[in-house]
Image (spheres, rainbow, N blue to C red):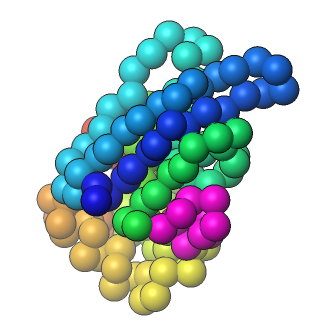
Amino acid sequence: MGAVEVRNLTFSFGVTPVLRGLDLVVEQGSMLTIFGPNGAGKTTLLKVLAGLLRPSQGSVHIEGMDAAKKPTTLRRLIGLISHQTYVYPQLTGLENLEFYGRMYQVAEPRRQARLMLEEMGLGAVMDREVATYSRGMQQ
């Protein structure tokens, strides 16, 4: 079983179909990039994957868990890199991650934030304000 498995996913806004019979498998340790024109259903797919919208038909499993049945648990496992960053520029990298860790009830948020920053190669700059980071560093 893949880390993310989508089977026959269909979603409609009223009578307007947005996603039709989508099948998708993302293996553990891999990354997925979603491209498409406006209105193609990219954001809708992400909202269904995150459990923010329920599919009209089909299923979504993340790490073996049904997204429709365990949305809160699954949101803690999902990451998204967007062009728009949601960081506070006046806070340090460490402070930003600790803030979000507390918001999402991560155990030991400061320690986890340090580990994540080190793992991403940002240990040397974790105490600098995010305003000094490049966009790539912020993402």
Q: Residue at x 70, y 39 (%)?
A: 56
Give whichever of 5, 117 is nearer the camera: 5
**Residue 12 visible within the image:** yes
Would you place residue 11 above or below residue 95 in this image?
above
As for residue 74 lying within the magenta part, the answer is yes
- Where in the figure is residue 87, as x and y percent of width and height? 50, 51
Q: Is residue 109 above or below residue 104?
A: below
Count of picture labels: 0
In the image, the segment drawn in magenta is: 65-75
The quarter in which the N terminus is drawn is: bottom left
Q: Is residue 57 toward the left or the right of residue 138 in the image?
A: right
Residue at the extreme bottom of the image, as rendered: 108
Residue 62, percent from left and from top: 43, 60
State left or right for residue 24 relative to residue 60.
left
61 over 94 or under it: above or below: above
Q: Residue at x 29, y 76 (%)?
A: 114
Query: Toward the viewer: 17 or 29?
Result: 17
Where does the image place residue 5, in percent across and percent down from the top left? 39, 50
Q: Tell me, yes or no, whether the highlighted magenta stretch contains residue 68.
A: yes
Asked which quadrant contains residue 11, the reply is top right
Seen from the viewer's position, the closer of residues 12 and 53 is: 12
Q: Is residue 137 visible?
A: no
Q: Is residue 24 left or right of residue 19?
A: left
**Farthest right residue in view:** 14
Q: Residue 139: horizontal and vertical position, in percent?
A: 36, 44
Residue drawn at 50 percent across, 74 percent down:
101
* Residue appearing at x 32%, y 44% in the figure: 25
Where is residue 135, by image quadrant?
top left
